[in-house]
Image: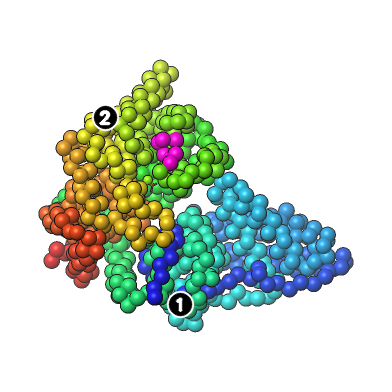
Amino acid sequence: MSRKLKGIAAAPGIAIAPLVHFHGTLDSIPTWKVAPEGVDAEGRRLDEAIAAVGRSIVALRRELADALSNHDARIYDAQVSILNDPTFRRDAVREMTLHGCNVEVALQRVVERYEAVFQNMAEAPMRERAADVRDVGRQLVAALMAKDRSKYTAHGRDYLFAADEFLPSDAGILDRAHLRGIVTAHGGKYSHGAILARSLGIPAVVGVDDLMSKVPSGTTVVLDGNSGVVIVDPSAEELAQYQLRLREQRGIDSRVAEVRFQPAVTLDGCEVSLFANVEGVRDLETLEAEVISGIGLFRTEFAFMERRQFPTEEEQVAMYRRAMAGSRGKPVTFRTLDVGGDKPLGYFRTPDERNPVLGWRGLRLCLDWPDILYTQLRAILRASALGHARILLPMVTTRSEVVRCRQVVEQLRQDLRSTGEKFDENIKFGIMVEVPVIVPVLPEILPIVDFVSVGTNDLVQYLLAVDRDNQRVAKMYDPFHPGVLRVLDQIVRATQAVNKPVSICGEIAGDHYFTPLLLGMGYRELSMAPVFLPRVKLTLRSFSIAECQTLAQQAMALDSTTAVRALISDQVRERWSRFLKAGPEDASA
Ligand code: PEP
Ligand code: MG
């Protein structure tokens, strides 16, 4: 019987192969007593190991130089600096002197201590250093034991790498010719392993609870790095479905380069604006401003979550200016702080809630703590002098919330004018449609906003009453539900009636199976993680608007999610196979 496990989608793509367990080498190490006069000799062994590991990290960095961006390659520089840190060596020697242990044991203890310190730090990047220290420790122990960490291989067969975590040094010993995907029990979307997997184009799912105990080595697994789903022992039907998607993906990958710089226009010449979702300043470093229409969603809360305390106004201004510079004059949509729910802020303790996603989150929280909102809005306004900023409010539930926020913005504008501080007088002010009740009252709210962005991740969870992060009901979280489609249609109609721009910034904007439906309803702005842009662009270039309209009407009239999926999959696959045979310019042939 097939089983579905849910993890975090860390690197996109589909992979089907047997999963193979791999383990590190810090677990079983030799132990012996070292007399005081023997410590110097152990110290020399350590120096030799440090030199050897240093050489191998530099070699690995060089080997991966073409595949990794400069930024991602710096992960290895961080490891070299840990290795060469005199305090690290001093601590290991002190451990040997005090406890009369061999260098392997000393290293194990020192590494554990360093890890604990990093893990307790509030900032995510610092916590990430714990994995680097562990990785350096593993490599040193392997070098000391003269163990050549042989390749992670399934002896010439395709495989999925499975481990508690994926560490930077693992990238060097993977059998990349046969590696199809990575799945780990720990790690987050921003763990170094996840960043490397994305950079190397290897599909990955991380954070799958109890992976190593639940899924034996050798089990066939489908890994969906787009949705974070791992299917263990897939049924024949699931296998066939994913094999098809895999073939599609291979075709798509080889064509991606071709469409990157082509315009996002449908077969009948309708232009679609494709925006990027950004989850913090780190994403800006890899953003290709020339291929996007702007940043459609800057999730500012991630920058807040990585810190130990609220960023000051000046710090925020600097961050928002960086985003404006990164988008090279194109619009940047700053969503105000959306913490609470599944995104707690370590330094701002909120009471435990029974239903946090229905609780004190997003705009509700900010309106109760006006200082947070004032500071952020003021910083966005100040940064807006540099270009084209937009303000976006999350989790709006009532019109009065919007009125209050507008008043705050107006007050801030007056203050800035009185002090001669520059800002964009025409800055646009929009709301997210995520709380279902906002949909029927849009006609009353639209006159007081400049644009609307539909946050389908939350909207779908609230419409279906299915927690978006609960793996037990993950199957029921299906945005293709005809009821969801009808609500999306209602939203676009309400905005068209008053001629206000509307975009989608939830994950469905990056799902190319959804593209024809959204275009058919009338959406012309889609904002997604940049990695999904090429597929969406390829898809929209193979449909005309009239075809999309017919499809959307048919889909909305259906009575089940399965029927909608079948209809749309047939259509998209058919375009894809035509496209893959003919080439991007002849998709309609
Ligand atoms: C959404 O809910 O669709 C959205 C874009 O916001 P987030 O995923 O950050 O909740
Ligand atoms: Mg949301």
Q: Based on the picture, tell me whether residue 361 belongs to the magenta stretch.
A: yes
Residue 355 on image: x %, y %: 44, 46
- Residue at x 24% of width, y 64% of height: 562
Q: Is the CB of the residue bearing disc 1 within 8 angstroms of ligand 1?
A: no
> 346 or 95, which lies in front?
346
Amino acid type of the residue that numbered disc 1 sits on in the rendered structure:
Thr
Amino acid type of the residue that numbered disc 2 sits on in the rendered structure:
Ile
Give residue 84's mark: none
Give residue 219's mark: 1
> 466 or 126, which lies in front?
466
Locate residue 427 relative to residue 228 in the image: left or right.
left
- Residue at x 52% of width, y 32% of height: 312
Residue 50, above or below 402: below
Q: Quadrant of the C terminus?
A: bottom left
Label 2 SS: helix
- Report which quarter residue 482 is drawn in: bottom left
Dot 2 surroundings within 10 Å: few (below 14), some, or many (20 or more)? some
Residue 155, above or below 8: below
Residue 368, above or below 261: above
Label 1 SS: loop
Q: Based on the picture, tell me whether residue 118 belongs to the magenta stretch.
A: no
Mark positioned earlier in the residue sequence (1 or 2): 1
Residue 167 on image: x %, y %: 55, 63
The range drawn in magenta is 359-365
Residue to which mark 2 is pinned: 448
- Report which quarter residue 322 is drawn in: top left
Q: Could you tell me if residue 296 is visible in this image?
A: no
Pick out the residue farthest to the front. Answer: 354
Q: Could you tell me if residue 554 is visible in this image?
A: yes
Dot 1 surroundings within 10 Å: few (below 14), some, or many (20 or more)? some
